[in-house]
Amino acid sequence: MITSLNPASHTLSNHTVQSARAGLQSGAFSAVELTTAYLERIHGLNPRLNAFITVADEAALAQARAADQRIARGDTSPLLGIPLGLKDVLSTSGLRTTAGSRILENYIPVWDATVVARLRAAGAVFVGKCNTDEFAMGSTTENSGYGVTRNPHDESRVPGGSSGGPAAAVAADLCVAAIGTDTGGSVRTPAAFCGITGLKNSYGRVSRYGVLAYGSSLDSVGVLARNAMDAALVNGIIAGHDPSDATCVDIPVPNYAGEIETSTNLRGLKVGVPREYFVDGLQREVRDGIQTGIKQLEALGARIVEVSLPNTSLALSVYYMIAPAEVSSNLSRFDGVRYGLRVSGHDLVDMVCNTRTQGFGPEAKRRIMLGTYALSAGYYDAYYTRAQKVRTLIKRDFERAFEQVDVMVSPITPTTAFKIGEKADDPITMYLTDVFTVSMNLAGTCGLSVPCGKDDAGLPIGMQVMGPWMGESTVLKVAQAFQQAVGYGSYIV
Ligand code: GLN
């Protein structure tokens, strides 16, 4: 099914944030009724899709009751009573948070991540914690310690990753929108594979406080939604300065929804097409889909120019040096002493070894070893320092390109969603999937994935719109105009 931008606001399913809000505010249904309907669908479909690791029935209904009281008092906050999914790397007070890892199987945080606290204060309803690759390391959600999530468009295929749970949940109408994280593509890739809209924020736009860390210089919190307007509404709540995260910058948060509301054409906008992103090996339908998307942007008034990001071919190597280095440090806290799993041993070292051997899955172990190696005394300069230098070159590529254009457009992934297991045994082939997404995290810039057609097998294709640092409004405007022009938001199953 293709979602229209304005679905009926009186039913209990297939809602955008906007339509759910209209239904709640007009009294067509209550937050408790809406939440109950979403929870029922989760219980019906989750055994098949495995989009949620934890379903929060009771807590969600309590939040829904509180939202109904606020609505009755005349509160009109945009997310009041809206059922949302949360990637399971976001700490939720009193609600199990696993990061997709068995090492945190029984971990219940005592505080909320700042993002969660802001959504909670805004009256959103958390229906559950969504599946993810272990500590967000992966491109398919096959690295989860809780089983793979299935793509709702074809259950034999991956939903993308690492935010595969949130993306599948939105695409299958198990929640209205969801929060994910993107360290090297993890919001954009699953959004593309599942046919929805995925916004990756600039580094420092959204607080990382309480988000279980993967690569601290790369991690960014983002939104998975049915369309740009919904992403804008949610982003308006989660973005902004947080004294608890020293890297979260103190720059005013635009009224994203207000700014994009009137975006109906792209006159005066310069769109760059980076030549290095249209390589051999691109699936034919993906290439054609993006070309058609670019023509539509042109028809909306944008000027299309070719640009170059010359260091693109180095991005994967740099990313897969820096991200494992950071994760090897971040995961050192899981030692059986502080919190999470503890497996006993005959002395302290044995206990730590047993805990980490049992608690971490193969990909986490692989990255800990890679990262520890890259950071070790004899190799630090040869690998880590050199990677940081090339990272600066990649960042400069983006700065130069954005002196010429407002946004850039490219594919998200070389192919549409592939079969579960197809690449799971070959980490290098899997890492290549990230070729178009990791540069933005190295550069710290923002962007999004917007659906732009389907391939011959009926699988969604995602178009990447890349913007400069803090350019969220611009990329959202492009997506909004594009979605209005093509007449739909997302492909929902
Ligand atoms: N696929 C990339 C990785 O495995 C990106 C993951 C992410 O963005 N969290 O590192």
Image: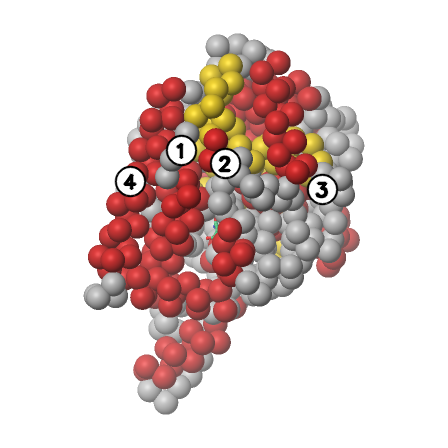
Q: Position of residue 144 (x, y in %)?
A: 56, 61
Alpha carbon separation for disc pair 1 and 4? 13 Å
Label 2 neighbourhood size at 10 Å, few (<14), some (14-19), many (20+)? many
Label 1 neighbourhood size at 10 Å, few (<14), some (14-19), many (20+)? many
Q: Secondary structure at mark 3?
A: loop
The residue at which mark 3 appears reads as 459
Q: Answer yes or no: do the residues labelled 2 and 1 have beta carbons within 8 Å?
A: yes
Quadrant location, the N terminus: top right
Q: Is residue 122 above or below residue 107?
A: above
Label 3 neighbourhood size at 10 Å, few (<14), some (14-19), many (20+)? many
Name the residue located 77 percent from the left edge and 53 percent from the top edge.
Answer: 44
Instruction: Name the image colouring.
Output: secondary structure
The residue at which mark 2 appears reads as 277
Q: Position of residue 177 (x, y in %)?
A: 61, 38
Label 4 neighbourhood size at 10 Å, few (<14), some (14-19), many (20+)? few
Alpha carbon separation for disc pair 2 and 1? 9 Å
Q: Position of residue 268 (x, y in %)?
A: 48, 10
Q: Answer yes or no: do the residues labelled 4 and 2 have beta carbons within 8 Å?
A: no
The residue at which mark 4 appears reads as 392
* 18 horizontally vs 96: left or right: right
Marked residue nearer the N-terminal end (4 or 2)? 2
Q: Quadrant of residue 250?
A: top left
Q: Which numbered tag is attached to residue 309?
A: 1
Name the residue located 35 percent from the left edge and 62 percent from the top edge.
Answer: 371
Q: Secondary structure at mark 2?
A: helix
Three-letter residue code for mark 4: Thr
Marked residue nearer the N-terminal end (4 or 3)? 4
Q: Quadrant of residue 292?
A: top right
Residue most toward the bottom? 346
Marked residue nearer the N-terminal end (2 or 1)? 2
